[in-house]
Image (cartoon, rainbow, N blue to C red):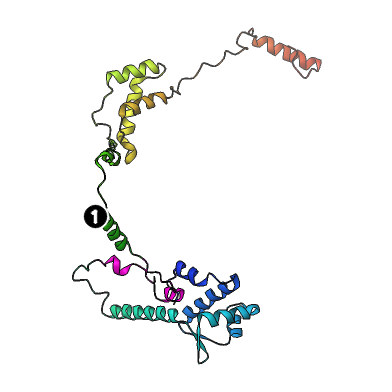
Amino acid sequence: MNFFPFHPGDYMLRTAHLDPIEDLAYRRLIDLYYVNEAPLTGTPEELARVIRLRSNAAEVSAVLREFFIEEDGTWNHGHCDDVIEQYRAKAKQAAENGKNGGRPKKTKQEPKANPEETQPVISDNPEETGSKANQEPITNNQIDQDQEICAATAAPAPAENLQKIIVPDQPKSSRGTRLPADWTLPQEWRDWAAANRSDISVDLEADKFRDHWHAATGTKATKADWLATWRNWVRNANTSRNVHAFPAKSRYTNLPQVNADEIRAKTEENKRLGVRRANF
């Protein structure tokens, strides 16, 4: 079996006197017991080698003789045997349910268990507490029933303290709505935009605003305050990017014009003189 119930409170109560090596040996011996689903077999020295504590055979032997019962060359543990038996019974029942098509349906609702009968009791005897008591954890149904009993038996609060107990109703947040299909820019919205952003086209931004939110989908398309949304839209609006400044005037536009005949004459003179570059 790969799972077994473990109750830390019971374990600590029974093993508080063990040193770290003895505690480790006990845990490993229990794990080996559950994995094999059978009593431990072998001498303390052999079992110490199996649980990887061969240099601490004395501690392993002390734990075996304190918590286990030796019978016919095997080491038995009463609580482990009970858990294994319960595990096998549940496995057998699950196999039978599988053959019959699954777990049978309940015909009627089972009554809640009486918390007085199911509450764990810690005995003064550590051996009894570890082996029998507190083997089943407290369920949620038991906790709910305990709370109901405490509420029914509790004394009513004084009248002067009722004001402290009553919690005022919290305001519910308003749900967002989509921009109406026939939305047009209200005049007061237009005036606000013109007063705060004189560098943009209010009509153009209104068209962009309407088309954007009509095309949006999902939860982002709904807003609780469309006026605030419009103000943010106007604040974040960019000026037109299609307007470009005129290029700077060229510094060569005022140069005097040159006659073509004069250029040819200078070129011929340079060839005659052997000049490779123009001298004008």
Q: Is residue 50 visible?
A: no
Q: Tell me residue 208's x, y (percent).
A: 34, 28
Residue 119 placement: quadrant: bottom left
Q: In the image, 76: left or right of 185?
A: right
Viewer-closest of 148 and 95: 148
Residue identifier under label 1: 152
Q: Tell me residue 134's x, y (percent).
A: 39, 70
Viewer-closest of 96 and 33: 33
Q: Tell me residue 173's x, y (percent).
A: 29, 36
Image quarter of the C terminus:
top right
Residue 277 placement: quadrant: top right
Magenta stretch containing residue 69, yes or no?
no
Q: Which residues are magenta?
A: 112-137
* Residue displayed at 53% across by 91% down: 73
The amino acid type found where label 1 is placed reads: Ala
Q: Does residue 22 sit above or below 141 in this rendering?
A: below
Q: Tell me residue 146's x, y (percent).
A: 29, 59
Bin the neighbour count of mark 1 within 10 Å (Cα to Cα): few under 14, some 14-19, many 20 and up: few
